[in-house]
Amino acid sequence: MDPSQFQSNELAQFIAQEKERAMVNEMVAKLTNVCWDKCITGTPGSKFSSSESSCLSNCARRYMDLSVIIMKRFQNMQ
Amino acid sequence: MDAFSSSPSSGSPSQQFSADDFKDQLKNQFAQAYAEEFLETIRGKCFEKCITKPGSSLSGGESSCISRCVDRYIEATGIISKSLFSAPR
């Protein structure tokens, strides 16, 4: 492949986009992993109960809240 | 597999491997890696939930548990994704 086929920073931009996409996917995967364990305590049924689905969406949001608090606390220590 | 090698179906060996080919191959490899990791996670979770005492074969109950588990895990991924990326609170 001839590197000059890429416009000046097209390659850098493309890679940055793919990296961000990968990071988002990883965050969702990680959260689903953790929240599944927290919220789906019994044998999986043929659909989620309403408490299971609200647990899942709450779980993701509270995890993000937690992330913000930890960041702030950490910054205050600097 | 070398990320930079052309597929055999692209014709003459002297044909250039374009920037678009590179981008497509990179995207495909990311997608593939993600899919494999996703499957591996589901395998682990559903084994944990559904096969509590491994017997000499899979029972009907275990098989249907596995099917439900896969569906639920995929659904859970959607719920989490939506709660993160749609209107907050």
Image (tube, rainbow, N blue to C red):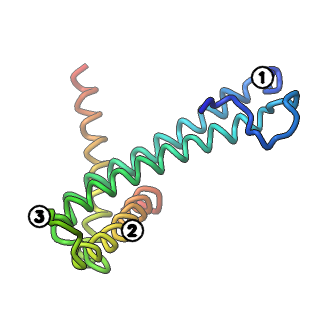
> Which of pointers 3 and 2 indicates the residue nearer the eye?
3
Which is nearer the eye, B64 or A27?
B64
Instruction: Identify which residue is drawn at 77% across, 32% down.
Output: B19
Which is nearer the eye, B61 or A53?
B61
Give the residue pinned by disc 3: B53
Estimate the x, y position of residue B36 in percent, counting from the top left: 44, 48
Mark 2 is surrounded, within 10 Å at the Cα level, by few (under 14), some (14 to 19) or many (20 or more) other residues, namely some
Mark 3 is surrounded, within 10 Å at the Cα level, by few (under 14), some (14 to 19) or many (20 or more) other residues, namely few
Picture quadrant of residue B29: top right
Subunit under mark 2:
B
Give the residue pinned by disc 2: B75
**B44 on left or right of B15:** left
Disc 2 to disc 1: CB gap under 8 Å: no
**A50 on left or right of B39:** left
Element type at mark 3: loop
Q: Amino acid at mark 1?
A: Ser
Instruction: Identify which residue is drawn at 41% across, 52% down.
Output: B38
Q: Amino acid at mark 3?
A: Lys
Mark 1 is surrounded, within 10 Å at the Cα level, by few (under 14), some (14 to 19) or many (20 or more) other residues, namely few
Number of residue marks: 3
> Which of pointers 1 and 3 indicates the residue nearer the eye?
3
Subunit under mark 3:
B
Instruction: Identify which residue is drawn at 24% across, 60% down.
Output: B47
Q: Give the Cα separation between the discs numbered 1 and 3.
A: 59 Å
Q: Give the Cα separation between the discs numbered 2 and 1.
A: 41 Å
Residue A8's disc number: 1
Which is nearer the eye, A67 or B3?
B3
Residue A62 vertical position relative to residue B66 in the rendered view, above or below: above
Locate the C terminus of chain B and report the quarter of the image it occupies: bottom left
Picture quadrant of residue A38: bottom left
